[in-house]
Amino acid sequence: MKVQKDIHAELGLRPGQSLELLRELHILTREGKVNQDSRRKLKQVYHLVQFIEKLLLEIPAEGGHPTLADHGAGKSYLGFILYDLFFQPRGVGHIYGVETRAELVERSRELARRLGFERMSFLHLSAAEAADAAQLPEKIDVVTALHACDTATDDAIAFGLRKHAKFMVLVPCCQAEVASCLREQKALSLSRTPLAELWRHPLHTREVGSQVTNVLRCLYLEAMGYSVTVTELVGWEHSMKNELILARWTGQRKRSAAERLRALLAEFGLQSLEALRYPGLPELAELGSDSN
């Protein structure tokens, strides 16, 4: 036991972390070493695990069985390590990995079987399909979507709303939809407002489109009853995809957020996206006033 503790300390691993799991995930080499790329990846995953663990601990104990759905799970580094460190020791809860690539789903299923991770399920579905899938429970406590490309993040948000998620942890990636809309209306926008200079050049169109997309998502979540914080992921500083959006259910729908969302859609000529990306946006008359 002392030898294993020494190995964990030497390699910078969390106490109790399964070495077998890290070998299966190719984070540990056959010689039991961690190369530079794997160390960086593990640092990123550990940061997310620590972040999500705190959220899971906030879930009322009377429920007893916290559930987490990980959209765009990929090779499920996050899901496996979170299960190993949090779910497995407690003997309760379930993780659902949602992924569109069949080979990765089957690979994760096989690895979970070999490791005896019985409360992990892997579903060959998109985030949009998962909202109505019988394989998932009616309610999910925590929804994660890490680097879910383009509108897959919006689908994960819709999933979270449908499943009455207590928390959503989102790291958006490759937001192209709004940029495309801005590009199509560039000439009209330039004639209407000097703000269109912000996205006149193609590079700026992509950057502004990405920024606007995430701002709209945050406002939508606030309008639908969540408090929202935005932060930067530790260890991801050299990536353009290092923005983490945390949504926490409060049940307080913000009228001001709905107003500002609609105002921004109008300002950027994006009104057509409201019904598609922000369904169920509360009518302003139905909402009380708020301080924000």
Image (spheres, rainbow, N blue to C red):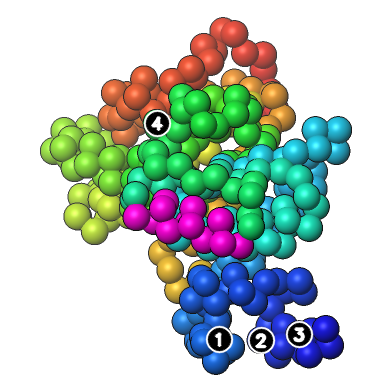
Kindly check if marks 2 and 1 are in contact, taking CB atoms under 8 A apart as contact: yes
Farthest residue, direction top:
285
Residue drawn at x 72%, y 53% is 87
Between discs 2 and 3, the one toward the N terminus: 3
Return the residue at label 2: 11
- Residue 129: which numbered mark, if any? 4
Relative height, residue 273 to residue 66 (above, below): above
Residue 172 locus on image (x, y percent): 44, 50
Q: Earlier in the sequence, mark 1 or mark 4?
A: 1
Which residue carries the number 3 mark?
4
Amino acid, disc 1? Val
Element class at badge 3: helix
| Kind of residue at disc 3 | Gln
Write down the region rendered in magenta: 103-115
> Neighbour class for label 1 at 10 Å: few (<14), some, many (≥20)?
some
Tell which tag, 2 or 3, sits nearer the viewer.
3
Chief secondary structure of the magenta portion: helix
Q: Quadrant of residue 155?
A: top left
